[in-house]
Structure formats: structure tokens, C-alpha cells
């Protein structure tokens, strides 16, 4: 079974995907990490993230980069949203994601374009969302817990800018697949979100 989970920053898609992977005993890929690894490599090599050729050169990143905690930095998230808008960067990371999705036994993938581009034939597709204010509150708490010096207003502005960039790019924009089930986590606890996600997956898989 392939489960595709898409949604904007801090919507809860990562937590939900990990819980789904555990529940169904499936491997999980956080595809955002791949774009974050490209962003981190661009930064380390002092390349220009707005230049497609520079960003493509960074797609050949060292696999160890994926385990670097610095990938979670807010700055890297912002940079990831810049490099991920280049069509050639998306093309360079496409096969790797498709291979993961189509491995024997199935998989859970989360990102922005899993249900639309990476695994359009997924057995279950979820689009996870929450209001920008609630997502900013969650991300702000996360960053504060890591000791990052940032204000709520700054996080909210960043979330809005990233939503805008991710939704308006011409290649693989952040949009729900037409057959995705929408899951709004704005007023749900983690436990309730996960329960609802499992119920939605069950409803989908019994339909097909
Ligand atoms: O957790 P958060 O949503 O903040 O970030 P992420 O999922 O790690 O993604 C970081 C950035 O990578 C996003 O803002 C997107 O621009 C990009 N991304 C993408 O374009 N396609 C994906 N499948 C995953 C991430």
C-alpha cells in the first residue's frame, strides 16, 4: 500500500506520516529532507540558491547530510523552498522518490507533490492542513524548544511567504490531488489527528 501525505509547513503531515508508517509497518520518507539537504549543500558551498544550475549541482549531496540536525533550521526550510521551485532540481530528485514509493510492500511519503507527481496512483492520499496562525504557533513552539531566537510574528510571516512560494511555483505546486482526503488539524490534538488519518486511509483502501 502506498500512502501519500501532502500539506504546507507545520500542518502536522510529518507527525501523521510517521504514525501511519508505524501503524501499517511501512517505511517512511520525509521528502522535505531531500530539498533541505540540497539547500544545506548550496549554503555550505556558497552557491546561489536562485540560480538553477547552482541548485542542481547541490542535488548530488552527500548522503550523510540527511542525518544533519542543521537541516531542521528555519533558515534551511526557507532556502529549501527557494531551491525546490527549480524544475531541474525537482527532476533530479524525482526517481529517488518514485523508487521509494514503489518499493515492494509499499511506503508512506510526505511532502508537497506526493499525491500529484511522485505517486499519483497511491492507494490513499491525504492533504493535511491547518490555519496559518495555528501552524505558526506550532512552528514557533518547536523553534523555541530548540533554542532558536525567533518571534511569533517572524515565524508567521515566514510561513505565509513559504505557502505563497510553494503554491504559486509552476512545477509541482502545493495543491491537493483531486482524489485526496482533506484533513484539517487546526483544532485536533496529535492523537486525534492520527486517529482521523488512519480512519481516512481505511476508508480509501477499502474503496479500491
Ligand atoms: O516541515 P516543513 O513543511 O517546514 O518543511 P519540509 O516539508 O521539510 O519542506 C521544506 C521545503 O521543501 C518546502 O517549503 C517546499 O518548498 C519543499 N518541498 C517540496 O517542494 N516538495 C516536497 N515534496 C517536499 C518539500
Image (spheres, rainbow, N blue to C red):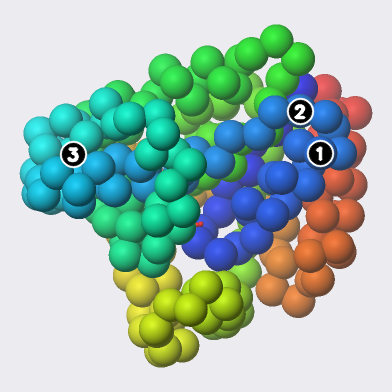
User: Residues under labels 1 and 2: Cα distance?
Assistant: 7 Å
Q: Secondary structure at mark 3?
A: helix
Q: Which mark is residue 55?
A: 3
On the image, the x and y values in percent for residue 90 come to: 32, 32
- Relative to 61, is 205 on the left or the right? right
- Quarter residue 138 falls in: bottom right
**49 versus 106 height, above or below:** below
- Relative to 9, is 14 on the left or the right? right
On the image, the x and y values in percent for residue 98 come to: 50, 20
- Quarter residue 86 falls in: top left
Q: Return the residue at label 1.
A: 22
Q: Secondary structure at mark 1?
A: helix
User: Residues under labels 3 and 1: Cα distance?
Assistant: 33 Å
CB under 8 Å between discs 3 and 2: no
On the image, the x and y values in percent for residue 82 come to: 25, 53
Q: Which mark is residue 26?
A: 2
Which quadrant of the rendered structure holds the N terminus? top right
- Quarter residue 178 falls in: top right
Residue in front for this viewpoint, 163 or 70: 70
Q: Secondary structure at mark 2?
A: loop
Q: Residue at x 89, y 47 (%)?
A: 199
How busy is the neighbourhood of tag 2: few (under 14 within 10 Å), some, or many (20 plus)? some
Residue in front for this viewpoint, 122 or 60: 60
Amino acid at each position: 500500500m502506498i500512502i501519500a501525505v501532502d500539506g504546507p509547513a507545520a500542518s502536522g503531515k510529518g507527525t501523521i506520516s510517521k504514525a501511519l508508517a508505524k501503524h501499517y509497518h511501512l517505511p517512511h520518507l520525509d521528502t522535505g529532507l531531500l530539498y533541505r539537504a540540497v539547500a544545506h549543500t548550496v549554503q555550505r558551498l556558497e552557491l546561489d540558491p536562485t540560480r538553477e544550475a547552482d541548485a542542481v549541482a547541490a542535488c548530488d549531496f552527500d548522503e550523510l547530510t540527511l542525518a544533519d540536525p542543521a537541516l531542521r533550521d528555519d533558515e534551511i526550510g526557507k532556502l529549501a523552498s527557494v531551491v525546490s521551485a527549480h524544475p531541474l532540481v525537482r527532476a533530479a530528485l524525482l526517481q529517488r522518490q518514485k523508487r521509494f514509493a514503489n518499493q515492494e510492500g509499499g511506503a508512506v511519503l510526505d511532502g508537497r507533490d506526493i499525491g500529484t507527481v511522485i505517486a499519483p496512483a497511491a492507494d490513499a492520499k491525504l492533504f493535511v492542513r491547518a490555519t496559518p496562525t495555528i501552524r505558526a504557533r506550532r512552528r514557533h513552539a518547536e523553534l523555541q524548544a530548540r533554542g532558536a531566537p525567533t518571534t511569533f510574528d517572524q515565524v508567521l510571516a515566514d510561513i505565509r511567504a513559504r505557502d505563497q512560494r510553494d503554491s504559486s511555483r509552476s512545477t509541482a505546486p502545493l495543491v491537493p490531488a483531486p482524489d485526496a482526503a482533506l484533513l484539517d488539524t487546526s483544532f485536533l490534538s496529535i492523537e486525534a489527528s492520527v486517529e482521523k488519518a488512519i480512519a481516512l486511509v481505511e476508508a480509501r483502501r477499502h474503496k479500491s
